[in-house]
Amino acid sequence: MSDERGDCAPQVEWDEGQRIRRLQLMMNLVMQVIAQDSKLSYEEASQMVADSRTAALAMFPGKELAYDLLWRPRFQRLMRERYRLQ
């Protein structure tokens, strides 16, 4: 007799793991573009950050707090360093 949760649990974990990896890749790409594109304006970079938050929350609905704890500080630090903000 098979347990329904047992059969589905590995797939659910794999799907979440895959979404996490995609999110990390996306965020790292956004950070690299902001850090390396010398022609990128502050406004364009800010829009990229906002769009990345929207995409992250589309992938993980209801996880605003997690985004704010994990990614917001990284983007804020990058923006301060890149655009010499105080």
Image (cartoon, rainbow, N blue to C red):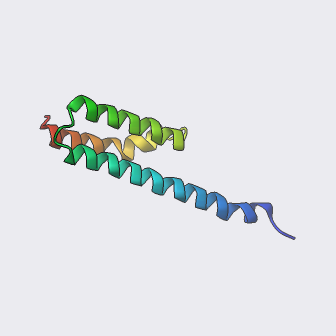
- Choose top left, top right, bottom left or bottom right for residue 73: top left
**Does any portion of residue 34 appear in the rendered image?**
yes
- Give the vertical position of 36 relative to 53 (above or below): below
Give the residue furthest to the right: 1
- Give the vertical position of 71 relative to 14 (above or below): above
- Choose top left, top right, bottom left or bottom right for residue 65: top left
Residue at the spot x=66%, y=61% of the render?
11
Specify the quadrant that holds the C terminus. top left
12 vs 39, left or right, is right
Coordinates of residue 70 in the picture (x, y in percent): 37, 47
Residue at the spot x=27%, y=35% of the render?
45
Coordinates of residue 18 in the picture (x, y in percent): 53, 58
Specify the quadrant that holds the N terminus. bottom right
82 vs 48, left or right, is left
Coordinates of residue 26 in the picture (x, y in percent): 40, 49
- Give the vertical position of 47 relative to 77 (above or below): above
Give the residue furthest to the top: 43
**Does any portion of residue 60 appear in the rendered image?**
no
Residue at the spot x=80%, y=65% of the render?
3
50 vs 12, left or right, is left
Residue at the spot x=15%, y=37% of the render?
83
The tally of labels here is 0
Give the residue furthest to the bottom: 1
